[in-house]
Amino acid sequence: MSLMPLFLLLLWMAIAAILRFTNLTLKPLWTDEFSTLVFSLGNSFLTIPLDRAISLMELLQPLQPSPQTNVQSVLTHLFTESNHPPLYFVLSYLWLKMFPTVNGWVSVEAARGLSALLGVLAIPMTFYLGWLAWRSRLAGHLAALLMALSPFGIYLAQEARHYTLAILWILGSLACLVQTTHFLRDRRSLPFWLGLVWVGMNGLGIATHYFFILTLVTEAIVLTGLLLLPSSALRPGLPIASCNRYWLVAVAGGTLATGLVWIPMLLSIRGTELTRWISRGEFDSSTWIDPLIRTVAGLVSMVYLLPIQGVPTAIALLSGLGVGIAALGTGWLMLRGWKQGAILPDDWFSTKGQDPLHKGGRGDRHQGWAIHNAQVGVSSQAQLSLQVLGGYGVTAIALSLLLTYGFGVNFASVFRYQFFYFPAVMVIVGAGLAGLWQQTILDFGFWILDWKVPWAIGLVVLLSLLGGLTVVADLGYQKTHRPDVVAEAISQSFQAPALVAIPHKTHGQTGRLMGIAWSLWQQHPTQAQQTQFLLNQIREGDEQQAIAPLQSTLKQLPRPLDVWRVNFRSELNPLSHTVLTQAGCTPKSKLLSVDGYRYQSYTCQ
């Protein structure tokens, strides 16, 4: 047996590792990552004092590992303070114990390294899903390579969050779905081990991220459609054996059982401050197209991305235009691959004779390809796999838009939430390009380009690599929040002492303030030690009382004093301004804004 397939797979994994681990700590920590760090250490946000000025060390104390914590500490604080299932956090706790601290703090590189490593492990699983679906190593390798280079995949892998672990379970669950449909198509009895693995993958997925439930809903819709629709490659007119019906019921019941254990926690977090942000409220006709645009942009960025952030506007516009053209071209190539290029199983090349495309001149090759397609066509294997994975991708996107437009959930607008159909998209793109690979010419209808198609696919790979490098260089998919920008603004006009104040409702706001403090500490440690921080607790229904901690803190601190008010929105914005001016503070800057922050500086004499 040739070692070349294994060598190629290891090469794709090496490329993925280089892209994911390069500049791993370049981007600033943001609030969601602080949640991962604190809970993964078995620490709590509740130990941070509220309503009084605190030092940098008091604010960042939960980032220091403690020998007294254990797995039970992780579970306790996570269940009482957060809204996520525990599997990734427990795994992260065990992972972080293997690495030393950095100046007493948790290692950010180690925390993000776990997610990056899981992203690398997705490469062989993507290959397996591509091979399993089409019995084609070519389809598997192209899907794995595109997964390794994917800008979206690198973006998720460079965050200390649970998305790459969830992607592994999604790949495993989709592999079980594909295998199940192959057994049903051939009217073979479904094996016990397959059902056990499928239930296990689904249970681990739910224990990693609750949005994995969307994967289960999508799979159920796809499988039901394949069993009922007349156009299904499963040939729904034929009866399903009783043992297989019981098998499907058992898998559904087992999966349901793994999800029911989380119902109490899901009910407890419903409508809380931690989840309220995702509700869009009433439909806003002025922004109705934004989720649709973001969905399309997210899909495109799974393969392509060019510098659009941190660059001049002209370059960003040209990059956007280039990405759009590349996406349209790739879409056309994929359609040609599915329409004309049958995805042939690995043994086809050993059983068939000389490729008819290599005979004769250009016209003969074109005619030979047409004859070849008429004789071979798209195999039933390819047709079924396309219906399964293509149906999964389309259904998942439709479900995402339904949640956004039908139920007022701010879902499609959040790029990272597209993770639950990301693996299917990569495998579908890889398979489409694999089908195209069999051609040696591109027929545009009105003229024929006599050009080796692998070079066209090579161009797709090169552009995808540029997208991956764009993310690594922080010129695309920058962090959702930019505390480093706020910290730099504080540093540029710094006059000791200083106070940074933010309203507090949940540990989400604590994480925002920690982001500013951490970035300031990394950039200017002396200034960070001369800065104090205030988590101004907000009490609903009494705005005047809500601003009282800021008022009392201003009276206690010595003058002169620089004050930075951050994210005092709605009614608190004019109230906080009034409190500051009454305390003898005058604005030094206008109200500024960056991703995740609205901030303004005052000087108090």
Image (cartoon, rainbow, N blue to C red):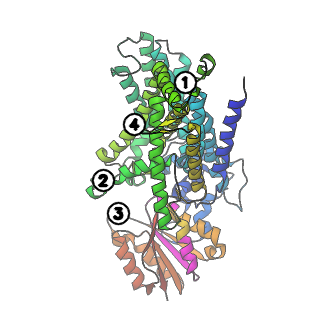
- Mark 4 to mark 2: distance in Å? 20 Å
Query: Closer to the camera, 589 or 174?
Result: 174
Amino acid of disc 1: Leu
Amino acid of disc 2: Trp
Query: Of discs 3 and 2, which sits in the foreground?
Result: 2
Q: Where in the figure is residue 458, as x and y percent of width and height?
A: 59, 42
Q: Are the residues flagged by discs 1 and 4 in contact, CB closer than 8 Å?
A: no
Task: Note whether residue 506 is visible.
Answer: yes
Q: Left or right: where does residue 577 sit relative to residue 178?
A: left
Amino acid of disc 3: Glu
Residue that label 2 marks = 288
Q: Circle 3: is it few (<14), some (14-19), or many (20+) Cα within 10 Å?
A: few
Residue that label 4 marks = 394
For the record, the magenta segment spans: 486-511
Q: Are the residues flagged by discs 3 and 2 in contact, CB closer than 8 Å?
A: no
Residue that label 1 marks = 344
Secondary-structure class at tag 1 = loop
Amino acid of disc 4: Val
Q: Are the residues flagged by discs 4 and 2 in contact, CB closer than 8 Å?
A: no
Q: Are the residues flagged by discs 3 and 1 in contact, CB closer than 8 Å?
A: no
Secondary-structure class at tag 2 = loop
Task: Note whether residue 180 is visible.
Answer: no
Q: Are the residues flagged by discs 4 and 3 in contact, CB closer than 8 Å?
A: no
- Mark 3 to mark 1: distance in Å? 63 Å
Q: Left or right: where does residue 13 sit relative to residue 258?
A: right
- Mark 1 to mark 4: distance in Å? 24 Å
Tell me the tag on residue 540: 3
